[in-house]
Every structure is written in C-alpha cells, then in structure tokens.
Image (cartoon, helix red, strand yellow):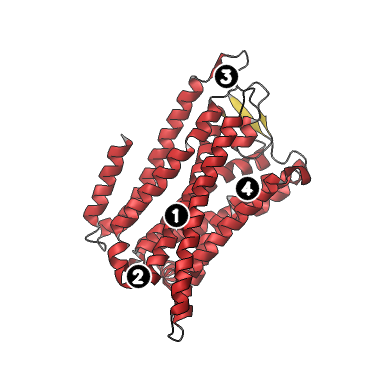
Amino acid sequence: MMTVILKTLLGQIQGLSGNPHSTTSRMYFLCFCTSLLRFKVHWVSRLIRKLYMASPSNDSTAPVSEFLLICFPNFQSWQHWLSLPLSLLFLLAMGANTTLLITIQLEASLHQPLYYLLSLLSLLDIVLCLTVIPKVLAIFWFDLRSISFPACFLQMFIMNSFLTMESCTFMVMAYDRYVAICHPLRYPSIITDQFVARAVVFVIARNAFVSLPVPMLSARLRYCAGNIIKNCICSNLSVSKLSCDDITFNQLYQFVAGWTLLGSDLILIVISYSFILKVVLRIKAEGAVAKALSTCGSHFILILFFSTVLLVLVITNLARKRIPPDVPILLNILHHLIPPALNPIVYGVRTKEIKQGIQNLLKRL
C-alpha cells in the first residue's frame, strides 16, 4: 500500500518537473512532503494500537493503560518559571518555520531544490515541536501528566525517526552544496525536482523503517514496575526502565540504529565539505572564495546547531551519575526547540533571496 502511494506521488512530481513555474508544481512539493509524513504517522499510530491490544502486559492483573510524566522530579518548583522561556521559544520556532514555508511557497525565485529541502527541514521541525512541547507545557501549566500507552509510543517513534530525518536532510543539503561548488556546470542537470522528490522519499522511508522497531520493541514489553516516567517525554530509556522484561536488546537496537544513521550522515557531510574546501582553496579569483563559502555558510551553521546540542545531550547522558538527572531532561527538551527556532532565522538573515521574500510577504500583509 505504501509503495503504491509513494510511486504515484513520485510519478506526479516527475510529470510536473517539466513545468517548475506552474502554480501546481509550486504547491506540490509541500503537499507531497506533508501527505507522506501524515500517512507515515497515521500508519504507525494504527500499528502501535494493534501492538497494545496484543501486548503481553494486557494479560497481567494490572495492565498499563497510561503513563505519568514527572518533569524535573528534583526541581518541580522551577516548572512554572521554566515554562515562560520554553513557550517563547516554541512560538518563535513555530512562527519562524511557518513564515519560511509561506515565503518559499509564494516567492517564485525560491522555487529551487535547495529551498525545497529547506522546506522539508522546516516541516520536520514543526512536527517535532508539536509532538513534544505542547505536552511539556500542559504538564507545567495544568499538571496534565498522564499520557496514553499508544500516544507515548507514537511520540517515541516520531522523536526517533524525525531526529534522524533531519540529519539525513542535512546530508542531502551537503550534497547539494558539493555539486553547486565542485560541479557548477552540471548542477542544473543533477539537482533537479526529480532528484529532490527521490531524496524526500529516501529521507522519510529510510529513517521511518529503521526507527520503527524502537517503539515496537518497547510496546511489546510487560510493564509491572509502575507507570511513572521520570521525564517530560516518552524516551525509550525512560519508558523501558519500567518493564519487568530484559531490555538489553531494546537498548542495543536503538544505540546501533541511531548511531549508524547519524554516523553515516555525519561521515558523508564531512566528506562533502572536505571536497568543497579542497575546491575552494584552489580558486584564484579575488573574492571568489568568500562567495563560494557564503553559499554553504548557512547550511554549515545549521549543522553546528544540530550536532552541538545533540553532542551535549549525549555527553550529559553518559555522565548521568555525575550531574543532576534533571539536566539531561532539560537538554532533551531544548534539543527539540533550539535548532527549530534558529534554523529559519539563520537562513532568513544570511540568504538575500529569503530576506527579500520575507519583506515581500510583510508588504502583502
């Protein structure tokens, strides 16, 4: 079923690629990405519900039907104060990414493969924010700590898969910059609308299917050690700790899958920028080096935001015994807020076309 839908969508995009400036083709890319993401989340949601109905935990005397999220167990008095900067960051992230999507949609000069990939990145950021932050704020403001069994594992799936999708999108964007700088004459023939469509299918399919076993393995566990999760979100480690079963394979799979996906993307990004740097250093024309580097400067800054926050989160989790347990929880939340809030701002400030497009959008309003 999913294969048929993907082939149909891809065929329609290929049919439209010959007329990139038509109204239909301008709108189709965002509709294509949104439809694919919605289909994937809906399909996973139904699968998790089926797993819950067939879960061995339902045969126990006290089946788990919901979990309770306890944010910052040692510093709960801080929650109301912390909710203000988090809500402001959330509004900034949603507003900035929505503005960027509308700008790319309305400005004909931005109907190019690089900005289509940037649109995909904004869509992923919006979904990640909506998956995590509203629930966190509901806990802070209204003490709504409960989350249903299927909703918890659906949130787990979205966090795991969309995180690696963002990494994969950065990798595709790095390849785009590599072709633009190292093979500029071949760029129009290599980076086409068809290439972008195939890249989107690859980004979503690869990371969705590799990340899917993580919530599936957790959903099949027997939960008999309580239902209180000492976290603001349904992370695999926090949830699986509540199980009476052996969770070694669960943790091992997430570790291997996560670092295989993120590691391979990082290696390809480093290789791409190594070739870019090698070509740029050979350029003799005055000002050409600065111009060439400026074309990939925004993308490089976005990668730094993403990797730095992720690296700090990993280090704090490894040093969990030496730091308060609330610190990794806070960093995990910020990882779903800081990059989404800063990504569109960086491109808006550093890219002349996007800046001009935003100004035109404001004039229309």
**Identity, as a three-letter code, of the amino acid under mark 4:** Ile
Callout 3: SS: helix
Labels 3 and 1: the sequence-earlier one: 3
Distance (Cα) linking label 4 and label 3:
29 Å
Q: Which mark is residue 184?
A: none
Q: Is residue 217 among what the camera can see?
A: yes
Crowd class of label 1 (few under 14; some 14 to 19; many from 20; radius 10 Å): many
**Identity, as a three-letter code, of the amino acid under mark 3:** Ser
Callout 4: SS: helix
The residue that disc 4 covers is 333
Q: Is residue 301 left or right of residue 31?
A: right
Q: Which mark is residue 183?
A: 2
The residue that disc 3 covers is 57
Callout 1: SS: helix
Q: Are marks 1 and 2 in contact (CB under 8 Å)?
A: no
Q: Is residue 79 among what the camera can see?
A: no
**Identity, as a three-letter code, of the amino acid under mark 2:** His
Nearer-the-camera pick, 318 or 333? 318
Labels 2 and 4: the sequence-earlier one: 2
Nearer-the-camera pick, 177 or 346? 177
Find residue 236 and report its image quarter: top right
Crowd class of label 2 (few under 14; some 14 to 19; many from 20; radius 10 Å): few
Q: Nearer the viewer, mark 1 or mark 2?
A: 2
**Identity, as a three-letter code, of the amino acid under mark 1:** Thr
Labels 4 and 3: the sequence-earlier one: 3
x and y percentages locating residue 279 in the rendered image: 43, 74
Q: Which mark is residue 169?
A: 1
Distance (Cα) linking label 1 and label 4:
21 Å
Q: Is residue 95 left or right of residue 322?
A: left
